[in-house]
Amino acid sequence: MLSCSSVQTPEFASQAQPDSAKQDENYIGSPIKTAPPKNEKDGFLLSWPLKGTVDFTRGYMGGVRPHQGLDLAAPKGTPIYAAHAGYVEYAGRDFSGYGNLVIINSGSNWSTFYAHMSKIQTREGQTVRRGQVIGKVGATGNARGVHLHFELRHHETPVDPLAYLP
């Protein structure tokens, strides 16, 4: 389980941290350094779906109130990037609570969910590459503030994304 904190992705300059993240009851905030992804030979690896300063407002946790992904606060309209290459399995609003949602399938039993988007910038069936813009950060669905809800699933089972992020 992750306590909430800030992450600075190394390949991009810092962005201003949104005041809305500081008001979230789950926000704690302490910086974590990240690294670019290793090569694909090391297994299934992800890139960060947001670039610059990323504030965790909630981490992956099981238990009584499970949270199956990472909530990453960023200003509304911040670009969201595909964390891996694959095809867009789903793009729409039909999953309860997720709001605008994109699901990218790697083709090898791994998929990533990007939820609460203000704008979807891809379409179902489209092939995407790692780092391609797929949407914008927002607060749709059951979002409690502007953020990206990011999930990783293997064989449709939620997995902690931090184990696969640099």
Image (cartoon, grey):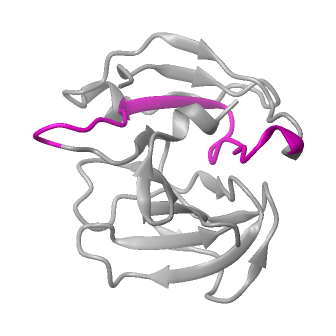
Q: Quadrant of the C terminus?
A: top right
Judge whether residue 58 is colored magenta: yes
Viewer-nearest residue: 166 or 32: 166
Viewer-nearest residue: 57 or 78: 57
Residue 76 x/y as whole percent: 47, 52
Q: Is the magenta stretch mostly helix, strand or loop?
A: loop
Q: In which quarter of the image is residue 52?
A: top right
Tell me: 25 left or right of 20: left
Residue 75 x/y as whole percent: 49, 44
The residue positioned 64% from the left and 35% from the top of the image is 165
Residue 88 vs 151, above or below: the answer is below
Residue 133 x/y as whole percent: 72, 63
Residue 136 vs 9, above or below: the answer is below
Number of marks in the image?
A: 0
Tell me: 123 left or right of 100: right
The boundaries of the magenta stretch are: 41-65
Viewer can see residue 36: yes
The residue positioned 68% from the left and 25% from the top of the image is 14
Residue 128 vs 19, above or below: the answer is below
Q: In which quarter of the image is residue 107?
A: bottom right
The residue positioned 50% from the left and 65% from the top of the image is 155
Viewer can see residue 148: no
Q: In which quarter of the image is the N terminus?
A: top left
